[in-house]
Structures are given as structure tokens and as C-alpha cells.
Image: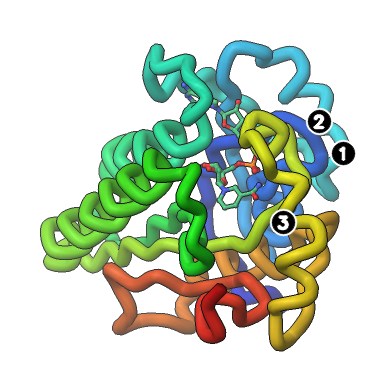
Amino acid sequence: MGILDGKRVLVTGVLTDSSIAFHVARIAQQEGATVVLTGYGRLSLVERIAKRLPQPAPVLELDGTEWEDVATAVHVSAYSLKALAMAALPLMDGGGAVVGLDFDASVAWPAYDWMGVAKAGLESCARYLARDLGPRGIRVNLVAAGPLRTMAAKSIPGFATFEDVWPARAPLGWKISDPEPAARACVALLSDWFPATTGEIVHADGGVHAVGG
Ligand SMILES: NC(=O)c1ccc[n+]([C@@H]2O[C@H](COP(=O)([O-])OP(=O)(O)OC[C@H]3O[C@@H](n4cnc5c(N)ncnc54)[C@H](O)[C@@H]3O)[C@@H](O)[C@H]2O)c1
């Protein structure tokens, strides 16, 4: 018995087996969901990675935007959330859940003003979607993950500074190489265990957001 038994889950953002979305898909399958993946551009790569999941999963093409700048991860998260919600609507006339991945900007990252802006954009996007989709029984929530060593992280200048800072600051500790805690938070929010939770941001960051920087 899994917490996603009988559910169909559309997961965007899988690129490698270190992608947070890959682990969301893996755990979602382990919890009983039927998973469909989307890939952007390098579909054959995503199809190869999909074979590493517990069960085979089809891969759909999804281009979130042409925005190819360093903020790809920021834009992608915001867009995917919208795309995901819009794409899933027809499949969710009986209600459902949308979970997006947010940035955890609790530690002052002066060099990352664009992250703050995109974070604010993503959070207000989630709130509007929560307001508009709530009457359909659709919940929209965000997971603010701590720093994780993924392809997207490679495009963030100075990301390495978090390698030392975050584990030291996190009351629960934090492993930059372990996407499981963030992925589990996404899966839990997709389950029926948060029936009255929408427009929320769940931090999966070892507690850094609570102790600040
Ligand atoms: N790695 C971290 O430290 C961290 C922390 C918090 C939030 N996030 C967010 O998590 C999400 C997943 O990133 P990740 O860290 O797993 O890295 P990743 O590189 O594994 O995943 C990023 C994904 O975005 C996809 N993508 C890029 N441009 C796209 C477009 N135009 N349309 C559709 N998809 C596109 C890529 O194909 C890739 O699958 C991102 O939104 C990122 O902002 C990452």
C-alpha cells in the first residue's frame, strides 16, 4: 500500500538521475502512482534516464519557454508549475494536486536578486493558482528545497559556497548530494495527506529557513 495508490502523476523537469524530479518520479512509483514524465529538448536522454525508474514511464515533450538564460531553473520552475496545472486540468476534474519546486532564499544571497524576484513570482503564481483551482478540488503547493547538486545547480555561480555553509547551518543537517528529502516532500504534498493545504510553501532544507543566515 502506497500513499499515491491509484494516482496518475505528471512529473516535469527530469534530466539526469540527480534531478529532483527523477526522485519525485521514483518515490511516486514506489508509493503506487502511475507516472508520466516530460522532457525538454534532450528527449532521448530523458528516455534513457526514465529506464532507471522502478517501472517504465512514458516521456512527453514539454518546452516551458525559450528563456535560455542563467535563470533557466527559476523560469522553468515558475513556468512548469503553470504548464503542469494547465496541462493537468482535464485529467483532474475529480480534484488533485500540483507541486512546484521553489528556491529557499532564507539565507541572504545578495548576488541572486533575480532568484528573489523569480521566487516571489513563483510564490504569487502558486497563490493565484491555489485560489483559482481550489473550487475544483485542486491543491497547489510549493516545496522550497535546500541546495542540491544537480545540472541546474551547476548553472548557479558560486553554488559551491553552499556546500559548506548549508550543512553547517541546518539544524537537521543537509546533504547537497541527497535529493530524497525534497522529493519526499513533493510526493507527500501530491498525496491525500494534505487535503486542506493549498498555496503553501513547505521547506525541505534541513531547517535553514528557520534559523536564517
Ligand atoms: N538544485 C537545487 O539546489 C534546487 C533548489 C531549489 C529548487 N530547485 C528547482 O528545482 C527544479 C529542478 O531542478 P534540478 O535542481 O532538479 O535540476 P535539473 O537540471 O536536474 O532539472 C532542471 C530541469 O529543467 C528542465 N528545463 C530547462 N528548461 C526548460 C524549459 N524551457 N521547459 C521545460 N523544462 C525545462 C531541464 O530539462 C531539466 O529537466 C528547478 O526548477 C530548480 O529551479 C533546485
- Mark nearer the N terminus (3 vs 2): 2
- Residue 72 screen position, x and y as percent: 49, 27
Q: Residue under label 1, please give it.
A: 52
Which part of the image, by quadrant, shows the N terminus? bottom right
Which residue extends farthest front?
Answer: 110
Q: Does ligand 1 reach within 8 Å of label 3's beta carbon? A: yes
Q: Does ligand 1 reach within 8 Å of label 1's beta carbon? A: no
Judging depth in this view, the residue of 155 and 90 nearest the camera is: 155
Q: Are marks 1 and 2 in contact (CB under 8 Å)?
A: yes
Can residue 62 be seen by looking at this rendering? Answer: yes
In the rendered structure, which amino acid carries the disc numbered 3? Phe
Q: Residue under label 2, please give it.
A: 49
Q: Give the crowd class for mark 3: few <14, some 14-19, many >=20 residues within 10 Å.
A: some
Alpha-carbon distance for marks 1 and 3? 29 Å
Residue at the spot x=12%, y=57% of the render? 132
Residue at the spot x=75%, y=23% of the render? 47
